[in-house]
Image (spheres, coloured by chain):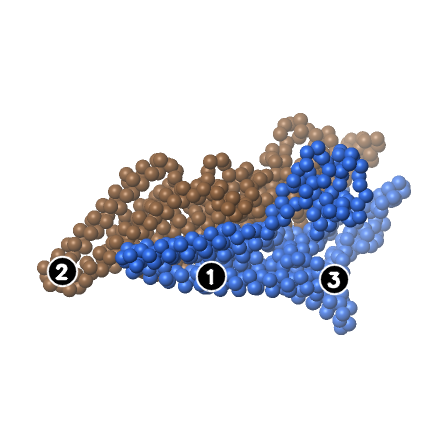
Chain colours: A blue, B brown
């Protein structure tokens, strides 16, 4: 009995010691410079601009690079009294560095180990072999987790290294940042195109709605000479729904990456590790871990891959001399104007030359629509349709490849990743229902 | 009667636990009778069954005790403390406000998340709906100009009705189609989040706890082990895993419920033409009056509305669905621990 008690005390001591070492591990401290009171309110001439690398402080506030303040030789900001309270020297608080997720993961593993150690000790102390067996079995799961976390740390570094290479993503610091940059670029293009479509749709609808009516004493007629334009409203609606779907998809993926960048490695992964240790919460823990890893790595990877493939495809297409028509896919789409050019508003009669003449059904109108050309209302409507038909190719690469295929591939990678990782985590979860996001 | 309240504790102590104890006694008596009959008849099968079921009833009671301990622990967990452990700032500028003060237990945190998700989705739906209404009204506005106009007087309408007509503000078919797609999505998000809220409330009201005594009894009955295990697993998973995951998602509220930049949700109220005086402006004023009534102050933001609804899809569908799927997977896992594996793949298809 004494042997058992001694063993329990030793195990408890070791566990407490290891956890206290982890908990007491010093975080990286950034000591702010002491405040130096300048003489009077004179702005001192200093040699260096503030930069992210230098520590520039003013009254407890860090001065960012874009403020263009000057730093002194000791990297301390000197400002006039009107801009900075110099009356009482204030030591600025140290900026909080983002906590490294590896630290949280180690802390979570140690916590799980401590809990299992307690279970084992209770089993050992009271001679309950089942409890000891459960603790031993679960300890293997912690070893698996340590391997997983080590792999994750290594792969994260590798992916970030890949992302940082100039060939892949220029100046981005992380893969997530690169994916967000890519999504924002695509979104910017999609929303530009959407605004363009919206403007053309609006203008064409005005032309299509024009009509003329003449009646005297209840007898008369009405003419809708611009009816040819109404055929364009259906294709515009279709394009609008496709663009809306693409934009919605991109915004959803963007939101998921933003959330994962903030919380995956600092909250979801460590909590997942803790929960995964116990059988009852293994499903929840496995899901949290899988969501954390998949949204942190696989989702941005999917976006970047399609982005890279798309860029390669584009450069190959543009370099090709097989068909010059292929270049239409990357040209700017046609635009339409239904109002006179700026500065010509005062020209007599010019205003009326633009747009469709509602009463003209003869086929010899003098009215003019840019890109649609002169001619009858019917000719103008047909020309507008032909121009728009050519423009379809200009939208395809952006809308189909970048804005639709990219997010869809990324989400499918996410879902497949969650399913595979939950299986690896010990409790496979069929997450195919999450495909609704697609 | 809400969870983590004195009423709920009374309900547990006076209803669930006595019934569970009664079920345990009845089961034990049944097993004892089985053992005695087995001994009396010299039937080894009955004796072995009784001996096996003694272990199972201990497992059942242990499971029930475990649920009660976890339930009390979850009521005692302070979500604010967990936030501070992970250095998470409290959510600010949320469309439906942050978590109410005092609601700090894990169960309250889960409820706050799903309520906020429903409110967020509804807010997104309102913004999209506002734009759809505005574009519908703008595109249906018609203008008739009498011909032979002299100084604002159209002589063409003097003896008849002659002139030109058109939609002065044009059509918005493309943007309306885009918004319709997104409106459908936001409706799915809203309905989905309400569905998840309802499931959580159903759990919180304690009805699932009635599965416990039933499960304890049925697990030990011949041919009903699977069903009894399922009942206990459902109670355990929906009282532990489902709120736990939702509460964890609630910790990320600042990121999940962020309103798109530049979108002031409070400006999109439900009533635009509040009085006949305003409506008269359509007649007396320019057609632009209608557009300004809807969109002045930079309220025309269809792109931001799409972004808002997309964020609602993540908050109201993606994350809660993941939580429910994990809960169902946990049911399978817990049932396996209790001795019987249950195929719930068909149920998963319904999520």
Label 2 – label 3 distance at C-alpha: 85 Å
* Residue that protrudes farthest toward the bottom in the picture: A322
Mark 3 is surrounded, within 10 Å at the Cα level, by few (under 14), some (14 to 19) or many (20 or more) other residues, namely: some
The quadrant where residue A137 appears: bottom left
The residue to which callout 2 is attached is B38
Q: Is mark 1 on a helix, strand or loop?
A: helix
Query: Which of the pair A163/A362 is nearer the observer?
Result: A163
Q: Nearer the viewer, mark 1 or mark 3?
A: 1
Q: Position of residue A210 (x, y in %)?
A: 75, 44
Q: In which quarter of the image is the N terminus of chain B?
A: top left
On the image, which quarter does residue B271 sit in? top right
Q: How packed is label 2: few (under 14 Cα within 10 Å), some, or many (20 or more)?
A: some
Could you tell me which residue is drawn at 71 percent across and 61 percent down? Answer: A170
Q: Which chain hosts label 2?
A: B
User: Is circle 1 on the same chain as circle 2?
Assistant: no
Chain of the residue that carries numbered disc 1 in the rendered image: A
The disc at residue A330 is: 3
Q: For this rendering, which residue is in front, A41 or A421?
A: A41
- In the rendered image, residue A406, in percent from the top left (x then y), is placed at 62, 60
Query: Which marked residue is nearer to the observer: mark 2 or mark 3?
Result: 2
Task: Report whether A163 appears left or right of B243.
Answer: right
Nearer-N-terminus badge (1/3): 1
Residue B187 visible in image: no
Chain of the residue under the numbered disc 3 shown in the image: A
Task: Pick whichever, A384 or B97, lies toward us.
Answer: B97
User: Which sits in the foreground, B285 or B17?
Assistant: B17
């Amino acid at each position: 009995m004494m042997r058992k008690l001694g063993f329990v005390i030793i195990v408890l001591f070791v566990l407490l010691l290891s956890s206290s070492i982890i908990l007491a591990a010093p975080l990286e401290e950034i000591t702010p410079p002491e405040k130096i009171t300048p003489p009077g309110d004179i702005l001192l001439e200093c040699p260096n601009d503030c930069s992210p690398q230098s520590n520039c402080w003013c009254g407890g506030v860090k001065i960012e690079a874009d403020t263009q303040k000057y730093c002194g030789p000791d990297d301390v900001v000197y400002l006039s009294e009107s801009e900075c309270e110099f009356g009482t020297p204030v030591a600025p608080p140290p900026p909080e560095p983002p906590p490294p997720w590896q630290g949280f993961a180690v802390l979570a593993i140690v916590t799980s180990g401590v809990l299992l150690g307690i279970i084992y000790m209770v089993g050992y102390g009271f001679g309950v072999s089942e409890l000891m067996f459960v603790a031993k079995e679960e300890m293997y799961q912690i070893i698996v987790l340590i391997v997983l976390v080590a792999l994750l740390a290594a792969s994260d570094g590798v992916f970030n290294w890949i992302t940082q290479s100039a060939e892949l993503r220029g100046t981005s610091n992380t893969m997530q940042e690169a994916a967000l940059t890519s999504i924002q670029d695509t979104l910017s293009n999609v929303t530009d195109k959407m605004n363009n479509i919206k403007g053309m749709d609006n203008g064409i609808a005005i032309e299509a709605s024009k009509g003329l009516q003449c009646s005297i004493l209840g007898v008369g007629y009405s003419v809708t000479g611009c009816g040819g334009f109404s055929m364009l409203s259906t294709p515009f609606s279709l394009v609008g729904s496709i663009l809306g779907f693409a934009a919605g998809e991109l915004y959803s993926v963007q939101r998921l990456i933003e959330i994962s960048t903030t919380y995956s490695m600092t909250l979801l992964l460590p909590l997942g590790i803790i929960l995964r240790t116990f059988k009852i919460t293994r499903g929840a823990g496995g899901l949290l871990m899988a969501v954390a890893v998949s949204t942190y790595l696989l989702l941005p990877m999917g976006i970047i891959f399609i982005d890279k493939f798309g860029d390669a495809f584009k450069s190959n297409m543009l370099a090709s001399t097989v068909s010059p028509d292929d270049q239409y896919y990357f040209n700017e789409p046609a635009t339409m104007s239904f109002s006179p050019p700026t500065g010509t508003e005062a020209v007599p009669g010019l205003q009326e030359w633009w747009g469709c003449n509602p009463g003209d059904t003869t086929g010899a109108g003098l009215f003019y629509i840019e890109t649609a050309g002169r001619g009858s209302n019917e000719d103008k409507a047909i020309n507008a349709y032909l121009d728009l038909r050519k423009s379809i190719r200009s939208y395809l690469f952006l809308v189909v490849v970048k804005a639709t295929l990219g997010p869809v591939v990324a989400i499918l990678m996410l879902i497949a990743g969650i399913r595979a990782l939950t299986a690896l985590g010990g409790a496979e979860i069929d997450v195919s229902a999450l495909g609704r996001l697609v | 009667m809400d969870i983590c309240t004195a009423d709920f504790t009374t309900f547990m102590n006076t209803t669930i636990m006595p019934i569970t104890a009664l079920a345990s006694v009845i089961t034990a008596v049944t097993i004892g009778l089985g053992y005695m009959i087995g001994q009396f008849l010299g039937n080894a099968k009955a004796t072995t069954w009784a001996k096996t079921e003694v272990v199972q009833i201990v497992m059942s009671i242990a499971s029930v005790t475990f649920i009660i301990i976890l339930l009390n622990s979850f009521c005692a967990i302070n979500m604010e403390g967990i936030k501070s452990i992970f250095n998470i700032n409290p959510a600010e500028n949320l469309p439906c406000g942050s978590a109410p003060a005092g609601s700090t237990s894990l169960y309250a945190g889960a409820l706050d998340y799903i309520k906020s998700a429903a409110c967020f989705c509804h807010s997104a739906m309102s913004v999209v709906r506002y734009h759809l209404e505005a574009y519908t009204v703008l595109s249906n506005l018609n203008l008739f100009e009498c011909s032979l106009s002299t100084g604002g007087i159209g002589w063409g309408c003097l003896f008849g009705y002659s002139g030109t007509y058109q939609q002065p503000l044009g059509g918005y078919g493309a943007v309306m189609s885009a918004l319709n797609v997104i409106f459908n999505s936001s409706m799915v998000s809203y309905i989905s989040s309400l569905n998840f809220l309802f499931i959580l409330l159903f759990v919180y009201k304690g009805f699932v706890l009635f599965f416990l005594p039933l499960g304890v009894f049925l697990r030990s009955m011949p041919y009903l082990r699977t069903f009894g295990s399922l009942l206990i697993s459902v109670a355990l998973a929906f009282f532990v895993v489902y709120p736990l995951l939702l509460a964890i998602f609630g910790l990320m509220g600042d990121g999940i419920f962020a309103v798109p930049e530049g979108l002031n949700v409070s400006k999109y109220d439900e009533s635009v033409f509040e009085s006949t005086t305003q409506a008269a402006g359509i007649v007396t004023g320019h057609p632009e009056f209608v557009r300004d009534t809807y969109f002045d102050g930079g309220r025309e933001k269809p792109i931001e509305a799409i972004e808002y609804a997309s964020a609602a899809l993540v908050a109201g569908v993606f994350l809660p669905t993941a939580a429910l799927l994990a809960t169902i997977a946990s049911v399978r896992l817990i049932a396996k621990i209790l001795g019987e594996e249950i195929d719930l793949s068909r149920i998963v298809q319904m999520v």
